Image (cartoon, rainbow, N blue to C red):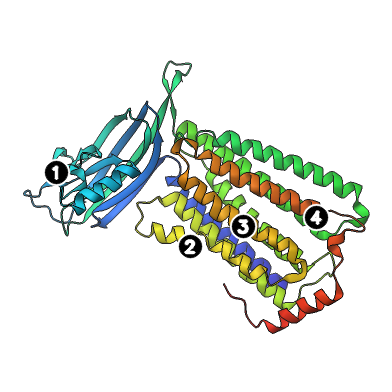
Amino acid sequence: MASTSVHHYLLLIIIVIIILAGSLSLTSGEIRVSEIRSDDRSIIPFDEFGFTHSGRLELRVSHISLSNPSPDLALYQLGFFLCTRDSWIHVLHQIQDQEITCALHSDAVKPVFTFDLLNSSHTIALSFNQSDANQYTLVFANCLPNLRVSMQVTSMMYNLDAAADADGKDVRDYLSVGKTLLPKIYFFFSITYFSLGALWTYVLIKKRMTVYRIHFFMLAVLIMKALNLLCEAEDKSYIKRTGSAHGWDVLFYIFSFLKGVSLFTLIVLIGTGWSFLKPYLQDKEKKVLMIVIPLQIVANIVQVVIDESGPYAQDWFTWKQAARSDGKAAVNLMKLTLFRHYYIVVICYIYFTRVVVYALGTITSYRYLWTSVVAGELATLAFYVFTGYKFRPEAHNPYFVIDDEEEEAAAEALKLEDEFEL
């Protein structure tokens, strides 16, 4: 009965992930459709994009509604503009020094449209050429206090390639200039993991007399990672060419969820010695699994919300902080001290991919944002290779030999711990 309920629980989680990813896929890609409803924020940031010298913004705004329909409103105080991170800091200083009262009036931003130019149909449809290469954020400014704005914003930002297609039309690249190499990068790493999967299969066949069930689980994790990268490569490739993922984002989120859960489950199972030293899990170890897996599920759901909503959502920053919760699960994993040296590597891997890679993406020039992706994938590849090498099927693998005193101390520590901290 317990096993059946667990299977039903996991099936329900997978269904929720599929529904959530499917419901958000309509807004995927660099063509964004954002719904603003009765929002009185003075600044609403939309997408950030790295332009080349041949960049372009296409903006369509419809269903515009203001909480105060008075014809005397100073509509020139409402509008869209583009700004870089450095120019935004300059704007804040100007407002603080009372040089200006509205960000739209700063000489550091590039005004795109102000509401005093609205037509009778109260819609906006324009194309804005951006010839200054830099990373810009599309921002809406509302400098009228207590005024609530509702609208539907469709934004398309892309760069024009120098080469034209067969019909003589300019080729659009909907990926930011620092991300345009991502399809090739993800595809290369997916081929690498498929190759590792083939090599691991060969090892399992050759060493079949010393193969445990967990070795097959390792193979499944490798395949999940390879499929996840393949879907991400296709996702980015379609976005690059069309501005929309055409459903590949749904597959990416599904395999990302399965890969994340299976990887952390594998780490816990290795730490407990399951399949290597014993065919069962103690109650305390099951509790660790019940902590790690939901944390990874939450992290994946939060990542979906962040990717699909963008920074215009009011709680976007809160979601961004929650996305790092899966790293905290590693603190609990340290309590499984059976393979304590391996967990030093686990902690280094988690904090490198969660902290160092994030910091690298923050400080790197917008033209080289792909380097943080490469760094993260190389670290992950190294971790997978290390894990496979240390726990390969061998008759006398030193990692499977546990000192009796060390094992007793680990068991005693597990007994003394009544609950696990997050």
What residue did someone put label 4 on? Answer: 390
- Whether residues under marks 3 and 2 lie with C-beta atoms below 8 angstroms apart, the answer is no
What residue did someone put label 3 on? Answer: 350
Check residue 363 in the rendering and tell me which mark sits there, or answer none.
none
Which structural element holds mark 2? helix
Which structural element holds mark 1? helix
Residue 365: tell me if it is visible. Answer: yes
N-term mark: 1 or 4:
1
Quadrant of image for the N terminus: bottom right
| Residue 121 place in picture, x, y as percent | 18, 40
N-term mark: 2 or 1:
1
Q: Amino acid at mark 3?
A: Ile
- 192 horizontally vs 257: left or right: right
| Residue 272 place in picture, x, y as percent | 76, 69
- Whether residues under marks 1 and 3 lie with C-beta atoms below 8 angstroms apart, the answer is no
The alpha-carbon separation of the residues under discs 1 and 4 comes to: 65 Å
Among all residues in the image, which is located at the extreme left?
A: 72
Check residue 322 in the rendering and tell me which mark sits there, or answer none.
2
N-term mark: 4 or 3:
3
Front-most of residues 318 and 85: 85
Residue neighbourhood size for the residue with mark 3, other residues' Cα within 10 Å, grouped as few (<14), some (14–19), many (≥20): some
| Residue 24 place in picture, x, y as percent | 46, 51
Q: Amino acid at mark 1?
A: Tyr
Which structural element holds mark 4? helix
Residue neighbourhood size for the residue with mark 4, other residues' Cα within 10 Å, grouped as few (<14), some (14–19), many (≥20): some
Front-most of residues 117 and 136: 136
